[in-house]
Amino acid sequence: MSNTPKTSAEIRNSFIKFFESKEHLFVRSSPVVPQDDPTLMFINAGMNQFKACFLGDNPNNYKRVANSQKCIRVSGKHNDLDEVGRDTYHHTFFEMLGNWSFGDYYKKEAIEWAWELLTEVWKLPKERLFVTVYQDDDEAWQIWKNVSGLPDARIMRFGEKSNFWEMGDTGPCGPCSEIHYDKGDLATQEATFADPVQGVNGANARYIEIWNNVFMQFERIKSGELLPLKNKNVDTGMGFERVCAILQGKDSNYETDVFSPIINKIAELSGVPYNADQSGMPHRVVADHLRSLSFAIADGALPSNDGRGYVLRRILRRASRYARLLNQKEPFINRLVPTLAQTMGKAFPEIRERADFVAEVIRSEEERFIRTLDAGLERFEKIATSHSLIPGTQVFLLYDTYGFPPDLTRILAEEKNLQIDEAGFETEMEKQKERARASQKQGLSAIGSEGWTVFGEGSTEFLGYEASTVQVKILRYKEDKGSYSIVLDRTPFYAEMGGEIGERGTLENSGATLKVFDTVKVNDIWIHRAKLLSGEVNGQEYTASVNLEERAATRKNHSATHLLQAALRKVVGEHVTQQGSRVAPENLRFDFTAFAALTAEQIKTIENLVNEKIQMCLPISTEVMPVEKAKESGAMALFGEKYGAEVRVVSMENFSKEFCGGLHAKNTGEIGVFRILSESSVSAGVRRIEATTAFGALDSFREEAKVVSSLREQFKAKTENILERVSLLTEQLKASEKLAADLRAKIAESQSADLFKNSIQVKNIPLWVSKVSMESSEFAALLEGAQKTMPLQGIAVVANVSRDTINRVPTGTIAVVVHAELVKKKISAGDIVKKLAELAGGKGGGRPNLAQAGTKNPDKIDEALGAAERIIVELINGGKNG
């Protein structure tokens, strides 16, 4: 380790090897999509997967740990999505190198090793290093002084804002010590390092924080009081991309070999050279966002309209919009995935193994957004024609619906000598954040001791593979609104994992009976959710009993998902991999990668193959083995799952072999029968099969048989003739509907003639104003007839007063029909109806030749009709009276 590492791979490996030499266990990065922490949208720090360890719940008995964690941050200080790409060192996706101590070493060793790695192994010049400590942490200050020999002025004290780390409003926390690196001119260091803005801990690109050592020694409770933790812990985080830039002598993270292969590929494919100034921002944005999207998708997240899926969609749309600035009007980002896989595939094999799937998901989303972007530009043109100041509500609409960040709308507005209401936009953004905060799922948290009644300490031992009834003790519990969260010393209840839902049952002793309605894992802690049926929760021994009927059904459905995946891979292709699942007593759901819907013949073949294996009564065996041995044996792992050093492998002879911690049947024959209920699309590149087994399958057969029996009775036909009878009735219905439509059209044409009996002249244009009362469907037909029968090149204004079909309250509609020849002269029905709607207390719009507005105040319709002539004159005159 005497040679200073230079490449990113060497730097990552050097960090890991250094801490392994200090007796640390290397733990692989957890997926960037959290599995057992509902409080997080994405993994955003290396410590996330070790949260429970900080409070002493340490089932893996970790003492010293090191890793390189994949992280995504898209909000918070310095991580506003719309700012990424402007500077050289902030990213949405980044790696965090870290080392941890759980009740083992503390400040002295953490500081000594940090200094040793930076100055002796990586040989960073000491004159460029600064250290910060919490203002009252004299211990850390003195250790730094003894270890580093830095001048007193370069061991700087700061307050809570900069140097006291907290997980949240409550929970583990403690003072921290940061190491900063001066990237500037040493000649000006003395004059700048203490400046609150231009110096250390200021908002500048010169003094860069590279490593944070958190000394986790307190727990903050709701009152704000700090309670000492039983064990003192160390939690450190180093910005991998930043330290690569320093060791490689680069001014920007984007110039390191972490990013340069991607940026070079962007320049090659686009034909636009990269520059480090603002003209290179599109390259930086696309390179950064490619990484976030690819790793999130590889770990199981998909773009969608809510939650983390919506965040991914926003990231992709921003990247796609910047790709357009590189003259890319077709899907482009997906073409960069192979380069990313080649660059980072060795450290993170999942990105290489899922590269094709990731690229296909991104390509599909890009195509969708390109269509949206064109629609957004069209929408902007309409907004711009009627405003000199683009309202904040419209800027937000373009942002939220069409993916236009405000700077794009500002550029488009400036091209037309317009401005945007930025304050109004910020108001709308804050409203959206409030809505998000209000609707965000407040996940159950097991972190912190506040609110828990504690009977004992320790972790939960799972005994459910062998037992369904176990004698247990409560370690701790918390009551909230009539529901209890309970941690046991051991349990037969399977906690929701790997798609299998949490088990239900009872906890009973002489003093209390509780009904367990769910079992979940939160930060590796087994939590039993229960309702108290009688007595009071106590610290005595309980009998924990699982619902045996539900367990038996769940076992069958879970084993069926393994058979289903194996059958899919044989029938559809080896590229099929599991994307998600839900295994419950009543049915199963299996999501898998596929780029086309299954054919009816494929579904039949898959269903037959699974049932064939069920009839063969294949033994189902389980074996716990080292994870690498499991992979070598050919066992399939689920992408996005977090695996330890050892894994449980479930095998069904030579047909199926998977990593799985769930409950299964003893042999495939116990499943009984397997039936596919539906096959559908989930998102780009992902299909879903819903199925059922055993008595669930029999129930589905019976339900369909009941329907068939009813149809036989109604049609007085044999089963084989039902489809023929339905087809005949369908054809007759279509013919009847066509006849009815023709009659309605003739009636409408006849009625519409009455609209044109009396007209007035407005600027030599005939205007007909009338009022009717009919059902909305009849009114629509009337307007259709009016367009066909208008005798002259004129304008018809027609109001309809009717009753709401649901609540039967009076409502009103105003419609405007403009002759096609007048539309050519820029007279628009939409413009007219908007003005009329304002007078009637409603809203509306439509096409230039036909537009409508609704109002819940039909009493105002007469006033609006009376103003029709004036409004049309004003619009013809360009907004002036006369």
Image (cartoon, rainbow, N blue to C red):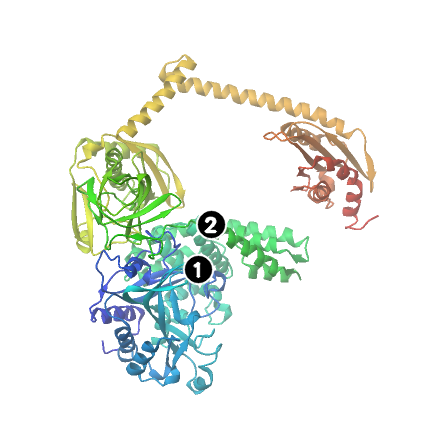
- N-terminal of the pair, mark 2 or mark 1, is 1
Residue occupying image coordinates x 78% and y 41%: 867
Residue 582 pos. (x, y %): 32, 41
Q: Nearer the viewer, mark 2 or mark 1?
A: 1
Residue 106 pos. (x, y %): 27, 71
Left or right: residue 734 versus residue 822 is left
Left or right: residue 727 versus residue 675 is right
* Residue sitting farthest toward the top: 716
State which quadrant residue 675 falls in.
Answer: top left
Q: Which residue is mark 2?
A: 367
Q: Is residue 656 visible to us here?
A: no
Q: How many marks?
A: 2
Q: Type of residue at label 2?
A: Glu
Q: Type of residue at label 1?
A: Val
Left or right: residue 390 versus residue 520 is right
Instruction: Tell me: residue 419, above or below residue 1.
Output: above
Residue 734 pos. (x, y %): 53, 22
Mark 2, other Cα within 10 Å: few <14 / some 14–19 / many ≥20: some
Name the secondary structure under disc 2.
helix
Q: Which residue is mark 1?
A: 74
How far, Cα to Cα, is label 2 from label 1? Answer: 23 Å
Name the secondary structure under disc 1.
loop
State which quadrant residue 592 falls in.
Answer: top left
State which quadrant residue 162 falls in.
Answer: bottom left
Instruction: Tell me: residue 627, above or below residue 585.
Output: below
Residue 123 pos. (x, y %): 29, 80
Instruction: Tell me: residue 151, above or below residue 296.
Output: below
The N terminus: image quadrant: bottom left
